[in-house]
């Protein structure tokens, strides 16, 4: 398991997915904010500026992210497995994961 | 045509068919009519097998021979089952081409084809596959009907599919559609063919790729736009992977030259704006390169304006190897329906007077130069009016090429200067006429500043005059007539229509005039929102617009932000400027080609209007002349231009055996997605990866968690799991996790004291060692210490302890962060707690061993206990909520219960705690204190045997059963005492002092022998003194303590407490315990930790308290638990201390048992003191209730006295403070409870307090003769405090007590009766002792004694009363306790 690395491309895809989603949300928020702004400022017109520039990540950052996520996942699985084992179960359930989740999140 | 044979053709039939095919092909050679059978045979040729390829070379050799032989060979190949469609196609094509060759150049085409066919064989060896035809697709050609069909488009498309075509259509008539359809069909026909669309600018490329997509919907994964912005290596990849390319001609040219373009796969080349294909433009170069390869491909050239002259059109035809010219203009019948009415107005504008004058001056300037040049013979035309810059340029070129023979060399420079000057002047003249004065002036001014023109003209008078005239005109002259006319036109236009929805483009050839126009438009800015639209190059005067700005301008123009664009020639062609209603040509003298492009900006979808502004004179003349030119060229191009132009032959590309028929298709076109830089690649590569790898089950799981309603893991689902560190794999816990765990422990202690603890405990147990150690310890305790009875209490205690231990360990863990250490500590603590003496062996090892043997350990434990107490006190102080203190107090008693040995210390602790609490509370709310006390009492009561608290009875029983059970009575007594002492603390007001005093007192008690220590203690009774003591004991510890000390007051208390703790240690050491010093040290070291722990515990308790006020009501249960917890905590935290204490306590007990007599005396004394203190407290607080309680509960008083005594005995200082404090505490507790809880709660509390006291007294009293019990109680307390004496006494008393305890009621009564006496007796000695101890306090003590005596006297009565009321009280206890809790 440790041998295998997560494909940085996959991570990139995930990142992009998240970026686009956040961008959309931001846009939505911006739209929501726009009327309020308009109330005060009454300025329209959207700027075509850097805001719209897509987020990017360079390859090393992606590799690093992939490794971090790999460690994170393996740690999560291992810890959840420990819980599951302690309960005498051979299958990791969501509840096992939930038990280790808070501390896991804080550990990363 | 031949579809049946095509479809039905099987391998079996093929041989036969092929013979027929060969024959038919032979016929076809003659007729140039491919037969259906040949077509049929060619179709399977698309099926290649390796054999065919391998043998191809051999066949290829034959191919270079004649066509007929080719056919035979190919047919033979086919017979052998080796067929390659390409070869056959090529041969067929070549054959057809040759047969059909009618045109001049056809021959070389055929040769080329043959050559390519021959080369194909060679290439094949290298694995190169020539373009194949999808025969099925080739049966038809597709024409989309998404947009309404136009006949001329269909016709042109049909033509363009099969020959190289130049399409000359006016703008807006759908050239792009023709191109797209042709491309799409070639895309279909040639599955591996590459199709190139070349457009002269990047914006055009982007525009056309989208347009083509929207027309025919070529899948976007096959299309790519490539401009110079994509680097060559990427382009190489694209050339390999894509099939449809939208490129700039430069890219095409370079890639062809670089060989990265797979020219052999090219099947179709579309050239947009083909009129540019002149000279060495990239179009021409690219086509030449392709023809040189050679490669067969379809060329489709598009242009609205192929050329203004017959020659130029012919050049284009030559350059692009065009076979057919398809020309339509607005007047053609099949176009007319689609052409909108486009009104062209020519407005002749007079030049204006100033301009005319300037023009005349200009001519004056020009004339001499012209005459000079013509004199030399360089200018034929002597009319300077009609000379034009091109004429001059031509003349200059001629002069440069062949200078006149008779002209001396030195004149050359002069003539050059003349030419240059004249060019400039004519340019200025032209500017003047077409654009007005300002551009001309600016030009002149610029030219006069430097260069040869300046040298030539700077001294010219006419020039100067002209310049002056221009300046004058510019400063205050009328605007240029053209400008004013243009404004008129615009105003008319915008007034007649909605200006919002109308768009206007103003074309000007000259940037300077663009600015002029802009300035003049500013005057009607209410109607016109104008912007300029110019090229990228930046001149001196004007900065260019980048492409971004241009796009933004167009965007805004579309959106309505601008309604007028003032454009230079950049706006004329290509860019997707939205259709406008009015085109104003500011200058008319432009080429008809450009004029057509300009006019093409309007009238596309609806009627438009073109206004041409022309100055009268030269400009007008030029315009008309050029208009005539354009008419002549249209004549040439009519009828396909066959009469005027010579065309080139081109291959049909599709073998004639295919007769594609038009198929009208409604295309389903996907939304066009502009190509992002990397998105496409990434998606292409990425998406497959994990979609492919997932099994159905996995994807189902993914769907389960990530689809519509996502499952969100809960972070709060298992809070109990967060109270301890989870097992880690590779990643260790972070500091934040530690904080989380700590916090969760606190919180859970709050909300689920029992459960959470239990969980945590279990968890820890699961984790490990703790449980194991604990259980053995427990067992040890049970076996060794406890009789039968002990078991129950132990269970309780154990349960409690477990619970408490859990949290403790957790706390420890949190504190230490390192789980191992914590567990170890917890283990040790557990061991200590359970069986201090016995267990000492267990895991505690060092501590236990060292402590066990030595009484000092007990002492140490004492200090520790005080520490604990102090901590709670601090906690209490810190937290205004009394509940916390109560809890602590209760915890104290519970602890006592749980740990009989501990009980003493614990009892003391609770007492102290109560005291402290009382003090604190007294200040704030006595009720709470009372509650606290009550709680403690209740606990004690519960211990005594009130049914209310299960643990209490059990504890009591335990106490009875055990010798330790004696301790429990003691504890109960202690509790009672503790209650009493609390009151004194209240009296003293200075809780710190009291506590200190108390703490000190124990120390002193211990140090009774060591009177010296008491002294300092007394002094120390003050905070400073305490500190001093602490210093005495262990400065380091003190420091540590101080540092840990909480807030100021709390800090003081803590300090005091801490100091006390060390002090006791010191005292212990000083007193009797050689070991003690070491112990002290160890303790000292430990205390700090303990303190911290304690603090935490206190915090926890506080948290619990505030959080669980409700818990308070159920003090019996909750308190015990809490108490247990607290005790456990304290113990575990102070575990060593407690353990030591336990051991010590046991030792003390033994000692006390030995010393019992003496101890009794001392106890008595203490009791006396206590009594005194009670009295005082009563007096101070509110004597009546408290006194009553005190009186009623002599035993209690005794207990209190014992506590006090212990304190007192420990330290005279304590005596004072304790006496005061104790009495007040008890009284105050009672009183305070009463007072504060004036309501039922107060009474209840009082009752409860009383009852507990009674109970305690009873429990204590019954078994041992009253005095004994009292003594026992006292000694126990004392023992805890004084350990030595107390223990002795306790040991004696305890057994007795235990017995009596069992008989609660009777015992109670007995105790009550008995107690008073002993207590009184004791009190006296205590007071005496106190007197002895502290001179300073003597007076107060005396008073106290007096009070005590009175109280004692009263007490019997009270006790009797209490006895009477005991039962009710006991009953009430539950309620009071609850009230307290509440």
Image (cartoon, coloured by chain):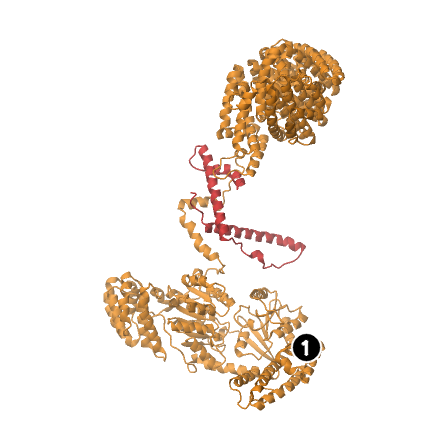
Label 1 sits on residue: B479
Residue B1109 in the image: above or below residue B466: above
Residue B905 in the image: above or below residue B667: above
Chain letter of disc 1 in the image: B
Q: How many numbered discs sit on the rendered protein?
A: 1
Q: Quadrant of the N terminus of chain B?
A: bottom left
B677 sits to left or right of B1348: left
Q: Quadrant of the C terminus of chain B?
A: top right
B1347 sits to left or right of B46: right
- The x and y percentages for residue B483 are 65, 76
SS for dot 1: loop
- The x and y percentages for residue B924 are 71, 28
Q: Nearer the viewer, residue B31 or B1147?
A: B1147
- The x and y percentages for residue B135 are 33, 65
Q: Quadrant of residue B428?
A: bottom right
Inspect this view and state whether residue B511 appears.
yes
Q: Residue furthest top?
A: B1265
Inspect this view and state whether residue B939 appears.
no
- The x and y percentages for residue B1330 are 71, 15
Badge 1, how many Cα within 10 Å: few under 14, some, many 20+?
some
Indicate the colour of chain B: orange
Q: Which chain is red?
A: A
Q: Nearer the viewer, residue B1212 or B1363?
A: B1212
Q: Quadrant of residue B505?
A: bottom right
| Residue ID at (64%, 69%) | B528
A98 sits to left or right of B560: left
């Amino acid at each position: 398991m440790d041998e295998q690395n997560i494909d940085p491309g996959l991570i990139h895809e995930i990142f992009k997915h998240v970026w686009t989603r956040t961008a959309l949300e931001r846009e939505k928020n911006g739209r929501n904010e726009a009327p309020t702004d308009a109330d005060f400022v009454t300025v329209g017109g959207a700027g075509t500026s850097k805001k719209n520039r897509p987020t990017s990540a360079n390859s090393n950052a992606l590799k690093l992210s992939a490794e971090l996520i790999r460690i994170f996942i393996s740690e999560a699985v291992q810890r959840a497995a420990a819980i599951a084992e302690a309960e005498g179960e051979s299958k990791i359930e969501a509840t096992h994961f939930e038990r280790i989740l808070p501390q896991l999140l804080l550990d990363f | 045509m031949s579809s049946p044979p095509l479809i039905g053709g099987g391998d079996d039939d093929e041989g036969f068919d092929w013979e027929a095919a060969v024959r038919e092909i032979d016929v076809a050679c003659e007729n140039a009519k491919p037969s259906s059978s040949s077509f049929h045979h060619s179709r399977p040729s698309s099926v290649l097998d390796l054999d065919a390829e391998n043998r191809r070379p051999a066949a290829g050799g034959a191919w270079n021979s004649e066509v007929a032989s080719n056919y035979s060979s190919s047919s033979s190949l086919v017979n052998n089952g080796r067929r390659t469609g390409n070869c056959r196609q090529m041969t067929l094509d070549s054959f057809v081409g040759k047969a059909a060759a009618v045109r001049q150049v056809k021959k070389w085409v055929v040769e080329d084809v043959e050559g390519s066919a021959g080369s194909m064989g060679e290439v094949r060896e290298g694995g190169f596959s020539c373009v194949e035809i999808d025969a099925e697709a080739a049966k038809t050609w597709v024409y989309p009907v998404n947009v309404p069909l136009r006949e001329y488009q269909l016709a042109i498309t049909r033509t363009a599919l099969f020959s190289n075509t130049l399409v000359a259509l006016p703008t807006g008539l759908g050239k792009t559609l023709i191109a797209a359809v042709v491309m799409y069909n070639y895309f279909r026909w040639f599955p591996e063919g590459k199709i190139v669309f070349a457009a002269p600018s990047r914006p055009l490329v982007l525009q056309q790729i989208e347009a083509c997509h929207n027309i025919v919907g070529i899948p976007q994964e096959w299309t790519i736009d490539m401009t110079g912005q994509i680097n060559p290596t990427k382009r190489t990849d694209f050339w390999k992977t894509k099939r449809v390319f939208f490129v700039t001609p430069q890219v095409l040219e370079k890639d062809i030259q670089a060989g990265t373009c797979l020219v052999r796969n090219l099947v179709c080349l579309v050239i947009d704006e083909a009129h540019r294909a002149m000279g060495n433009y990239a179009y021409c170069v690219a086509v030449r390169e392709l023809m040189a390869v050679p490669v067969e491909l379809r060329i489709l050239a598009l242009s609205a304006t192929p050329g203004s002259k017959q020659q130029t059109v012919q050049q284009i035809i030559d350059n692009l190897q065009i076979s057919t010219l398809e020309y339509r203009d607005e007047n053609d019948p099949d176009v007319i329906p689609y052409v909108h009415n486009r009104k062209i107005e020519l407005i002749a504008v007079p030049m204006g007077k100033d301009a005319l004058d300037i023009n005349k001056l200009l001519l004056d300037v020009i004339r001499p130069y012209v005459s000079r040049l013509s004199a030399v013979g360089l200018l034929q035309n002597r009319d300077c009016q009609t000379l034009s810059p091109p004429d001059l340029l031509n003349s200059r070129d001629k002069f440069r090429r062949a200078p006149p023979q008779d002209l001396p060399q030195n004149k050359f420079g002069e003539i050059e200067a003349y030419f240059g000057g004249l060019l400039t002047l004519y340019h200025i003249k032209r500017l003047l006429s077409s654009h007005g004065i300002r551009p001309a002036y600016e030009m002149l001014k610029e030219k006069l500043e430097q260069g040869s023109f300046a040298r030539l003209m700077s001294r010219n008078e006419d020039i100067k005059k002209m310049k002056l005239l221009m300046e004058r005109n510019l400063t205050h002259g009328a605007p240029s007539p053209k400008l004013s006319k243009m404004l008129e036109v615009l105003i008319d236009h915008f007034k007649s229509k909605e200006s919002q929805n109308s768009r206007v483009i103003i074309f000007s050839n000259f940037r300077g005039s663009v600015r002029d126009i802009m300035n003049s438009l500013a005057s009607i800015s209410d109607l016109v929102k104008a912007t300029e639209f110019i090229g990228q190059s930046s001149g001196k005067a004007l900065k260019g617009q980048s492409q971004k700005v241009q796009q933004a301008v167009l965007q805004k123009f579309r959106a309505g932000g601008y309604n007028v664009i003032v454009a230079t020639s950049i706006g004329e062609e290509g860019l997707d400027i939205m259709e406008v209603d009015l085109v104003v040509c500011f200058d008319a003298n432009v080429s008809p080609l450009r004029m057509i492009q300009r006019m093409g900006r309007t009238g596309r979808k609806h009627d438009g209007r073109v206004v041409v502004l022309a100055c009268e004179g030269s400009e007008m003349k030029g315009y008309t002349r050029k208009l005539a030119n354009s008419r002549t060229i249209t004549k040439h191009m009519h009828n396909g231009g066959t009469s005027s132009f010579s065309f080139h032959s081109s291959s049909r590309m599709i073998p004639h055996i295919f007769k594609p028929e038009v198929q009208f298709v409604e295309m389903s076109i996907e939304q066009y997605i502009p190509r992002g830089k990397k998105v496409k690649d990434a998606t292409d590569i990425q998406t497959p990866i994990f979609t492919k790898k997932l099994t159905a089950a996995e994807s189902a799981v993914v769907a389960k968690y990530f689809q519509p309603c996502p499952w969100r893991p809960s972070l709060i689902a298992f809070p109990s799991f967060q109270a301890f560190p989870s097992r880690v794999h590779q990643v260790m816990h972070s500091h934040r996790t530690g904080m989380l765990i700590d916090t969760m422990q606190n919180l859970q202690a709050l909300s689920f004291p029992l459960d959470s603890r239990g969980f945590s405990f279990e968890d820890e147990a699961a984790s490990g060692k703790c449980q194991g150690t604990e259980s053995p310890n427990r067992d040890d305790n049970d076996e060794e210490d406890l009789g039968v009875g002990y078991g129950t209490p132990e269970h309780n205690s154990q349960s409690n302890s477990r619970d408490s231990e859990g949290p403790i360990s957790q706390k420890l863990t949190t504190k230490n962060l390192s789980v191992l250490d914590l567990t170890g500590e917890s283990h040790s603590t557990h061991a200590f707690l359970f069986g201090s003496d016995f267990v000492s062996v267990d895991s505690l090892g060092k501590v236990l061993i060292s402590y066990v043997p030595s009484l000092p350990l007990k002492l140490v434990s004492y200090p520790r206990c005080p520490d604990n107490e102090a901590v709670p006190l601090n906690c209490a102080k810190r937290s205004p909520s009394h509940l916390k203190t109560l809890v602590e107090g209760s915890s104290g008693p519970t602890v006592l219960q749980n740990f009989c040995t501990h009980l003493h210390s614990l009892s003391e602790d609770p007492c102290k705690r109560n005291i402290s609490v009382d003090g604190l509370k007294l200040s704030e709310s006595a009720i709470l204190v009372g509650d606290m006390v009550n709680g403690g009492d209740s606990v004690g009561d519960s211990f005594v045997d009130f049914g209310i608290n299960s643990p209490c009875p059990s504890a009591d029983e335990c106490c009875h059963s055990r010798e330790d059970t004696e301790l429990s009575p003691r504890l109960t007594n202690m509790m009672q005492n503790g209650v009493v002492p609390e009151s004194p603390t209240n009296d003293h007001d200075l809780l710190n002092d009291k506590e200190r005093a108390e703490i000190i007192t124990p120390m002193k008690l211990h140090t009774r022998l060591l009177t010296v220590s008491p002294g300092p203690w007394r002094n120390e009774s003050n905070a400073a003194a305490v500190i001093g003591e602490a210093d005495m004991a262990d400065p380091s510890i003190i420091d540590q303590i101080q540092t840990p000390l909480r807030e100021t007051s709390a800090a003081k208390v803590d300090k005091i407490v801490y100091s006390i703790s060390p002090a006791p240690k010191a005292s212990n050491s000083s007193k009797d315990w050689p070991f003690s010093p070491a112990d002290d040290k160890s303790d000292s070291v430990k205390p700090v930790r303990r303190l911290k722990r304690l603090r935490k515990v206190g915090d926890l308790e506080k948290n619990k308290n505030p959080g669980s006020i409700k818990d308070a009501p159920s003090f019996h249960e909750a308190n015990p638990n809490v108490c247990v917890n607290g005790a456990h905590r304290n113990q575990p935290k102070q575990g060593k201390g407690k353990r030591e204490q336990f051991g010590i306590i046991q030792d003390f007990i033994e000692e006390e048992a030995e010393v019992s007599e003496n101890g009794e005396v001392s106890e008595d004394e203490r009791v006396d003191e206590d009594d005194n203190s009670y009295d005082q407290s009563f007096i101070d607080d509110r004597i009546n209730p408290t006194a009553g309680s005190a009186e009623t509960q002599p035993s209690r008083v005794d207990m209190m006295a014992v506590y006090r005594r212990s304190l007192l005995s420990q330290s005279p200082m304590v005596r004072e403070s304790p006496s005061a404090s104790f009495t007040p505490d008890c009284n105050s507790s009672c009183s305070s409870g009463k007072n504060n809880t004036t309501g039922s709660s107060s009474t209840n509390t009082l009752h409860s307090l009383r009852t507990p006291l009674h109970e305690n007294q009873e429990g204590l009293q019954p078994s041992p003769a009253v005095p004994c019990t009292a003594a026992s109680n006292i000694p126990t307390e004392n023992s805890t405090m004084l350990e030595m004496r107390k223990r002795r006494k306790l040991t004696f008393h305890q057994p007795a007590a235990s017995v009596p305890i069992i008989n609660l009621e009777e015992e109670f009564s007995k105790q009550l009766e008995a107690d008073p006496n002993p207590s009184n007796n004791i009190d006296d000695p205590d007071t005496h002792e106190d007197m002895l101890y502290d001179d300073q306090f003597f007076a107060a003590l005396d008073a106290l004694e007096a009070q005590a005596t009175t109280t004692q006297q009263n007490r019997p009565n009270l006790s009797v009363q209490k006895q009477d009321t005991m039962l009710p009280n006991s009953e009430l206890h539950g309620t009071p306790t609850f009230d307290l809790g509440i």
